[in-house]
Amino acid sequence: MKILFLGSPNFAKIVLESLLNAGHEIVAVVCQPDHPAGRGKKLQMPETKVFALEKGLKVLQFDKVNAHLDEIRALDFDIFVTASFGQILSREFLQIKMGLNVHPSLLPELRGATPIQTALLQNRTLTGVTIQRMVYEVDAGDVLEQEQLEIGEEEDYVSLERRLADLSCKLLNAALAKLENGQAQFKPQVGTPSFTRMIKKEDGRLDFNKTAKQLFGVVRALSYNPGCYFEIGGQRIKVLKAKVSEETLSPKEIAATRKRFLIGCKEGALEVLQLTAPSGKKMDGASFLNGNNARKVD
């Protein structure tokens, strides 16, 4: 099939690559504009753009795709596919051709832009992927394919994103094959919708007045992006990996033994396994404590 693909980050890049490997023709890749990143604020290309240029695919970058409908109509495609695109398509856009959306949750659960992070933040044990027909109401379209996936106890965003992307590739290619063969059967979503929200940088700040289990969910979900942190003596410590401990400590208290980096929470304690020190050096929690005499976090 001739496919117009809309998506920007790594999840979308994996899905795009699977479409090419399955033999579909990608008429163009629509993604977000390059954006400044890192300390130097150098412009960084979306991952789908990097991949598309390597493969010689046409790339269109729109801050507001709905303002470029004439360019979209001029493209020769059979269907469009969206995956982590990050823009709401207008009714006019949706009237051009039929579209499928790849959504990493079991719709109608976790509609919105952050289903992977939210599943981890909520310490869910089950999620999945839904291939749905694009409609104007966000993530409310009829379902063509859906499959659940168990979330591992120690799983973080990076590993869960990869597994959900792989499952998305399988389901999307199955959905497209059914459309080509005239065997597609769309079914309404069943159940009560739940919704995600946008993640902000401040969501990564660890509040030790919450339970250790809650903070473990934050680290799993956000340590990769936008990052998790707390402060000691006004200096920021970035948490990369952690786990729940049953130790009893007062909130914000650091365990006196110093053999493990344990910080008290409302219930239980959070053990910091890997961190980035204020110097920028990555190290395990115990090694950090060897050079720091703090007894409490800020």
Image (cartoon, helix red, strand yellow):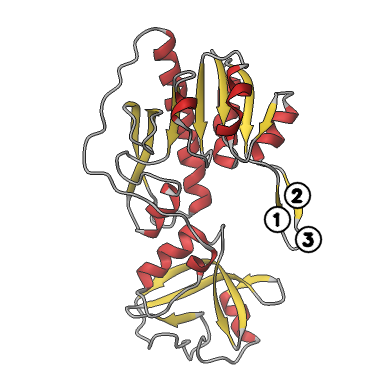
Whether the residues at callouts 2 and 1 have beta carbons within 8 Å, the answer is yes
- Residue marked by disc 1: 37
Disc 2 crowd rating (10 Å Cα; few below 14, some 14-19, many 20+) is: few
The residue type indicated by label 2 comes to: Leu
Q: Position of residue 96 (x, y in %)?
A: 49, 19
Disc 3 crowd rating (10 Å Cα; few below 14, some 14-19, many 20+) is: few
- Residue marked by disc 3: 40
Mark 2, secondary structure of its residue: strand
Q: Residue at x 47, y 21 (%)?
A: 173
**Mark 1 and mark 3: span between their CA atoms?**
7 Å
- Residue marked by disc 2: 43
The residue type indicated by label 3 comes to: Gly
Q: Please tell me which residue lies in front, 65 or 291.
A: 65
Q: Please tell me which residue lies in front, 105 or 280.
A: 105
Q: Residue at x 54, y 62 (%)?
A: 223
Q: Residue at x 27, y 44 (%)?
A: 193
Determine whether 31 is above or below 210 in the image: above
**Mark 3 and mark 2: span between their CA atoms?**
9 Å
Whether the residues at callouts 3 and 2 have beta carbons within 8 Å, the answer is no
Position of 256 with respect to 45 (left or right) is left
